[in-house]
């Protein structure tokens, strides 16, 4: 299994911290956010990891090298000065990912979720990890049924944790779900959420509710709180 780490965001809400450091390279408890993921991926036995980049892209190989220190081979997929958004970023990575299911994780989250719990071959186009909605975004994203099926409507709603296993076929016919997608240098730029919602309507997306620790590191304040908590052993 291969893995893809989303790391191309501009980190606008994290400024000035992200003026010279991409958000996934910001440190908590002494190491970059993305390194927490790389360590878990290596422990899982994954050896090939792609990192999509845009803002301050050169900093990633400078800090992470080629991945050998974790027993990984890192591949940096540069999207250009403007990120292609989540859907476009995934589309851009498809030639590297191939045809098999892959693990996808956002580079700007932290969680103690054990990646080994994820299915290697999900019985759907995507298997998403969901968490209780955080205080800063209480409305949630999707409704989870007892049998694992996900829906875009209804309540109660859970929040997508930025972690899951996907099949490349998820993006087949993606343009039907995002007819207004932009083009940047000949590549599509679009969000992944409309594609997921369309596949949910067809019963092709499943998920699980994780009740452990998880943080969307979207502001300097949340980063500082996470750092303090981890350093205190919490």
Image (spheres, rainbow, N blue to C red):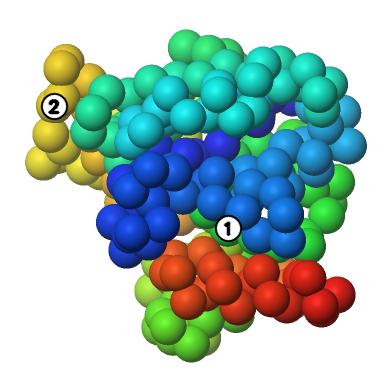
| Location of the C terminus (image quadrant) | bottom right
Foreground of the two, 190 or 13: 13
Looking at the image, is 48 positioned above or below residue 122?
above
Point out residue 145 in the picture as x, y percentages from the top left corner: 61, 73
Q: Tell me: 104 left or right of 211.
A: left
Q: How crowded is mark 1: few (under 14 residues within 10 Å), some or many (20 or more)?
A: many
Relative horizontal placement of residue 29, taking residue 11 as reference (left or right)? right
Measuring from the top left, give residue 115's x and y in whole percent.
Answer: 79, 48
Quadrant for the N terminus in the image? top right
- Which residue is at 65% across, 20% downward? 65
SS for callout 2: strand
Question: Would residue 208 be seen by someone viewing this image from the given angle?
Answer: no
**Residue at screen point 47% across, 35% down:** 170
* Quarter of the view holding residue 100: top right
Number of the front mark, 1 or 2: 1
Q: How far apart are marks 1 and 2 (CA)?
A: 28 Å
- Which numbered dot is residue 109? 1
5 relative position to 147: left or right: left
x, y (%) of residue 106?
54, 48
Residue 84 can be seen, yes or no: yes
Residue positioned 72% across, 22% down in the render: 67
Picture quadrant where residue 29 is located: bottom right
> Is residue 206 or residue 226 the one in the foreground?
226
Give the residue drawn at x 69%, y 42%.
Answer: 35
Label 2: how many Cα within 10 Å (few below 14, some 14–19, many 20+): few
Q: Quick one: label 1 or label 2, which is nearer the N terminus?
A: 1
Residue that carries the numbered disc 2 in the rendered image? 183
Left or right? Give the position of 193 relative to 233. left
- Compared with residue 110, is residue 25 higher up or lower down, i.e. above or below? above
């Amino acid at each position: 299994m291969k893995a893809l780490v989303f790391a191309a965001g501009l980190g606008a809400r994290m400024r000035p911290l992200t003026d010279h450091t991409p958000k996934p390279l910001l440190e908590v408890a002494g190491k970059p956010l993305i390194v927490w993921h790389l360590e878990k991926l290596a422990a899982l036995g994954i050896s090939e990891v792609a990192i999509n980049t845009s803002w301050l892209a050169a900093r990633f190989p400078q800090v992470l090298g080629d991945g050998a220190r974790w027993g990984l081979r890192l591949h940096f997929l540069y999207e250009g000065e403007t990120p292609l958004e989540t859907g476009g970023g995934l589309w851009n990575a498809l030639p590297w990912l191939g045809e098999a299911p892959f693990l996808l994780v956002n580079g700007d989250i932290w969680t103690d979720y054990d990646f080994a719990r994820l299915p290697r071959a999900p019985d759907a186009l995507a298997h998403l990890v969901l968490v209780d909605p955080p205080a800063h975004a209480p409305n949630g994203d999707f409704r989870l049924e007892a049998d694992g099926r996900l829906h875009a409507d209804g309540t109660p709603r859970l929040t997508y944790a930025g972690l899951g296993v996907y099949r490349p076929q998820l993006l087949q016919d993606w343009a039907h779900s995002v007819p207004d997608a932009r083009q940047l240098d000949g590549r599509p730029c679009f969000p992944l959420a409309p594609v997921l919602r369309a596949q949910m309507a067809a019963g092709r997306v499943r998920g699980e509710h994780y009740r452990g620790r998880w943080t969307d590191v979207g502001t300097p304040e949340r980063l500082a709180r996470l750092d303090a908590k981890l350093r205190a052993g919490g």
